[in-house]
Image (tube, helix red, strand yellow):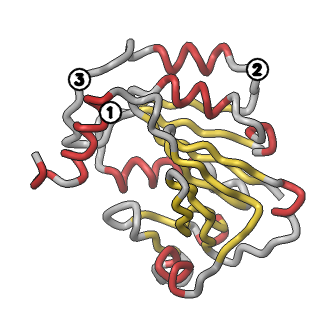
Amino acid sequence: MKISLLCSTYDDPLGVERLLESDTIDKFDSILILDGKYFNFNHKLDYDENLTSYIIKDSKLKNIIYKKTEPMFQSNKRNMMFAYTMHNDYTLVCDSDEIPYFNRELFETENVESCSCIMLDNYGLLQPRPRLFNMKHLPYFKTNHSEIFSSITGKDIAQEAIDNKTMIESIIIKHDKSLRSKQRKIDRRGFVNPNLT
């Protein structure tokens, strides 16, 4: 049984470094870091654009795949991430401002049919999020990060996991934006909700 971690990042080398040094990161069989901004995300770089790649090269982990991308829509970037991990059994999706805590032994006793929610610790607020995917379903993002469909059944497996309260207990993701600049947070809010800018 193989499980990949997919991490989407852009101009967040310290977040990537924290991720690669987290307590249970070595429990994943492979780690894909896809580095590039979303189309229409306007943000002046806080760091040297090559710093993330230097941090990855310095990492002791040998199972990292690192790819830089041109600006692309969010669904396209995430679908590219899935394409790199189709050979694995399961894939967990996170961003570089999140830290996964993975109990591998417990995970191997749990059942992930198509998609399962994990618990996201969002500054003390625990929220179920559809982030773990069974790759035999060939999942793909339709238009955004909340519409994720199975190529096999045609169903929205993310919504199905939320509706059915399909949870696993072996993975918790902690959300922590503390390493990001104030301007980055403002730019991100403007990207998510342009009416606020």
Residue 45 at what x, y percent from top left? 29, 21
Residue type pointed to by label 1: Glu
Residue at horizontal 47 percent and vertical 79 percent from the top: 159
Q: In the rendered image, which residue does mark 2 sit on?
A: 60
Q: In the rendered image, which residue does mark 1 sit on?
A: 70
User: Could you give the CA–CA distance between mark 3 and mark 2, rounded to whole angstroms?
Assistant: 30 Å
**Residue 143 is drawn in which quadrant?**
bottom left
The quadrant of the image that shows the C terminus is top left
User: Could you give the CA–CA distance between mark 1 and mark 2, rounded to whole angstroms?
Assistant: 27 Å
Residue at horizontal 83 percent and vertical 58 percent from the top: 1
Asked whether 118 or 35 is in front, the reply is 118
Q: Horizontally, is 140 left or right of 21 in the view?
A: left
Asked whether 23 or 81 is in front, the reply is 23
Is there CB contact under 8 Å for labels 1 and 2? no
Q: What element carries label 3?
A: loop
Of circles 3 and 1, which is in front? Answer: 3
Q: In the rendered image, which residue does mark 3 sit on?
A: 44
Residue type pointed to by label 2: Lys
